[in-house]
Image (cartoon, grey):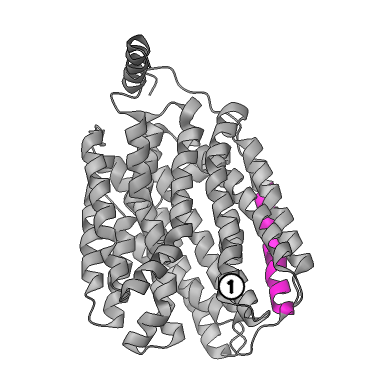
Amino acid sequence: MSRGQAAEAAATAARATAALGGVSYPLLLVTVSLTSVIAPLNSTMIAVALPDVRGDFNVSHAAVTWLVSAYLIAMCVAQPLGGRLGDQLGRSRVLRAGLATFLAFSLAAAAAPSFWALVGLRTAQAVVGAAVLPNGAAMVRETVPLRRLGQANGLTGSAIGLSAALGPVLGAALLSLGSWRLLFLANLPLVGAGMLCLFLLRYRDRPSSGGAVVDWPGALLLAGVLVALTELLGGLRGGRTGAVAATAVALVLIGALFSSRQAASPRPLAEWRLFRIRSYSAATTYILLGNLVMYTTLLAVPFFIKEVQHKPVGTAGLLIGTLSVLMSLLSPVSGLISDARGRRLPAMTGAVCQLVAAVMLLAGIGTGVSSLYLALSLAVLGLGSGLGTGAASTAAVEAAPRELAGAAAGSMSMMRYFGSILGAGVLAGILNSGAAPGPEVFRALFGVLVVMAAGAVICSALVHSFVQEPAPGGE
């Protein structure tokens, strides 16, 4: 490169940085991507360590699954809280605090003396980690022009999806080196790198003047709703009629208290008024349903491979890898398409692909189904998730007022995790019969997912294509 070309490239970078309010675009994406992968990585990394944890603490299969369920529930509940705190106190400030406390709880979890102490520390990890995801997304929304927002969200979304996919691989590698406790120590270099990038970014916070006001009673009630819902779905086919009835009554009562609290609170847990915006409501519901389909399939395939086809676990890993890699590779492509052609096109295309994949799995699932057919079905599902989720996420955040970007991103992430919780609950409820599941059980499961995927197609049709970007000084 000549001296003149180098000078022109530097001038172009300087103009781009100035257009972003002095924030470097590449460093912003690196910072948000790096900090955002920590929570999903910890969500999936623990999966391969569950047998070791169960053996070390001598707990039941049912008990050890709470290491996963409690984490998902805490992430779901705390996402809107983290986003609202970022709106009120400043995004980078809350992000720094979230990273630091996440690391502290990780180090404590590595030394957990008992199983339930470990569950409590994992839950605390999720609560503070929930401050990271929505505030990273809000920083991108607040800084990047709408014409490049899809590309930015596609790149960060790809990093998040790839980290979730690589979590079990990293977990297995660390387990081969020693104890499951190493999984928590692995957060030290990740958090350190994220904190360094955040320091170098020098992002300027614009906190609101109202101070920190969050709905803690609402958060506790929502956690109660999700715990009761998880127990109810998991016990539907377990033959415990009395326990299921008691859980259903508890769910209704806690749900009524939660609804009453949200209606009366001046600052409710989530920014529920955002759901009056058609595109925001459609996009977040699409994200819920799409994640339900994807996450349930991701959990169900290993059970099918092992307990119906009696094939090695490595086969399931390769099949799930097909889904995960395509999701990660296509997220940036989805961002570019949505910037050029609008958010609705890739969202609808992704939703239709997810529906086709669910129909393929419903039609083809059986004892003798080939791994090639399953791989093709999962590839179509990964194609749909990669194309649609990024576009819908961008549509949700940009449909909200910019000053509520944190609350919008938090509520959107809440819906994503709610989809995961529902998916895990539906799977547990369908498989919880006491006997080894047969092909007919998985047909029933994929029948449910076809209906959910069809709902996602309807929602995607209601997502906007473009939002008019306000003139400078208009917000």
Q: Is residue 330 left or right of residue 446?
A: left
Q: In this view, does 451 lie to the left or right of 410?
A: right
Residue 116 appearing in the image? yes
Q: In which quarter of the image is the N terminus?
A: top left
Question: How many numbered discs, if any?
Answer: 1
Q: Main secondary structure of the magenta part?
A: helix
**What kind of residue is marked 1?**
Pro
Q: Which residue lies furthest to the top in this view?
A: 4
Q: Examine the structure image and report whether residue 441 is included in the region drawn in magenta.
A: yes
Which segment did they paint magenta?
A: 439-457
How busy is the neighbourhood of tag 1: few (under 14 within 10 Å), some, or many (20 plus)? many
Question: Where is residue 381 drawn, in percent x and y?
Answer: 65, 55
In the image, what residue occupies the spot 29% across and 44% down?
86
Question: Where is residue 411 drawn, in percent x and y?
Answer: 44, 50
In the image, what residue occupies the spot 46% across and 68% down?
226
Q: Residue furthest front?
A: 2
Residue 285 appearing in the image? no
Q: In this view, does 470 lie to the left or right of 363?
A: left
Which residue does the numbered mark 1 point to in the structure image?
302
